[in-house]
Amino acid sequence: MDTNNPKICINQCNFGRGVFAKKNIIRGDVILAFAGRIITLEEALRKGEKESNPLQINTTEYIDIEEPGVIVNHSCNPNAGIMNNRVLVALTDIYKDEEILYDYSTTMSENSWTMNCECSSSNCRKIIKDFHYLPTNIKEKYLQLGIVQTFIVREHNEKVKGVYTLKSEMKH
Ligand SMILES: [Zn+2]
């Protein structure tokens, strides 16, 4: 475990353990990098109940993330996001003792896993699903922030291109 990270600590919170700011973190700061063994989709699925833990980095590739990254909880109104597939960056100024949270949908495109959410944000989606199921405005926001896994951005662009192709074909 990365106990040397001066920015964070692990504490109890509403959802079991969570990662909290040990000091004020400024918007744009790198909070932590997700680390762990690279595993396949099959290995991720075999983890069963713990399936929510591996971080998806490609269509069939996951990082079996270790602490502290694995303890970071989800929020529908996150104060952090993942850039370059594995670096957790502050999206807002985060104050000491505040919990660090990212939106799990920014990393999910597998059509097999959903999670009930009680994050109590006013925009809580209640059921957390793959990125492609997000409302369009939230998709756009996350894409602009650059906090969507690159393989999902690629999938998204292909879907958008597909829709345009279909529309232009229908005109003829
Ligand atoms: Zn929520």
Image (cartoon, helix red, strand yellow):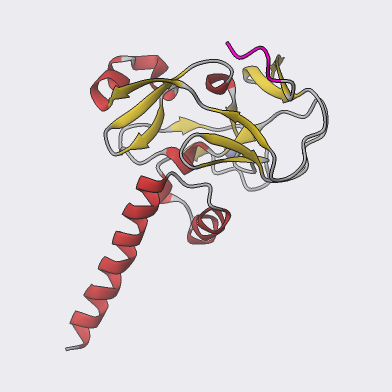
User: Looking at the image, which residue is at 46% across and 39% down?
Assistant: 85
- Give the x, y percent position of residue 90: 68, 40
Judge whether residue 62 is colored magenta: no
Q: Quadrant of the C terminus?
A: bottom left
- Give the x, y percent position of residue 52: 43, 24
The answer to whether residue 32 is above or below residue 49 is below
- In the picture as drawn, the residue positioned furthest to the front comes out as 4
The answer to whether residue 167 is above or below residue 113 is below
The quadrant holding residue 22 is top right
Q: Quadrant of the N terminus?
A: top right
Observer-nearest of 23 and 105: 23
Observer-nearest of 123 and 32: 32
- Give the x, y percent position of residue 36: 44, 19
- Whether residue 50 sits left or right of residue 21 in the image: it is left
- Dominant SS of magenta comes to loop
- Whether residue 79 sits left or right of residue 163 in the image: it is right
The answer to whether residue 51 is above or below residue 148 is above
Q: Quadrant of ligand 1?
A: top right
- Give the x, y percent position of residue 84: 48, 42
User: Looking at the image, which residue is at 22% across and 74% down?
Assistant: 166
User: What range is drawn magenta here?
Assistant: 1-5
- Whether residue 134 sits left or right of residue 71 in the image: it is left
User: Looking at the image, which residue is at 35% across and 41% down?
Assistant: 109
User: Looking at the image, which residue is at 63% across and 48% down?
Assistant: 123
The quadrant holding residue 164 is bottom left
- In the picture as drawn, the residue positioned furthest to the bottom comes out as 172
Judge whether residue 4 is colored magenta: yes
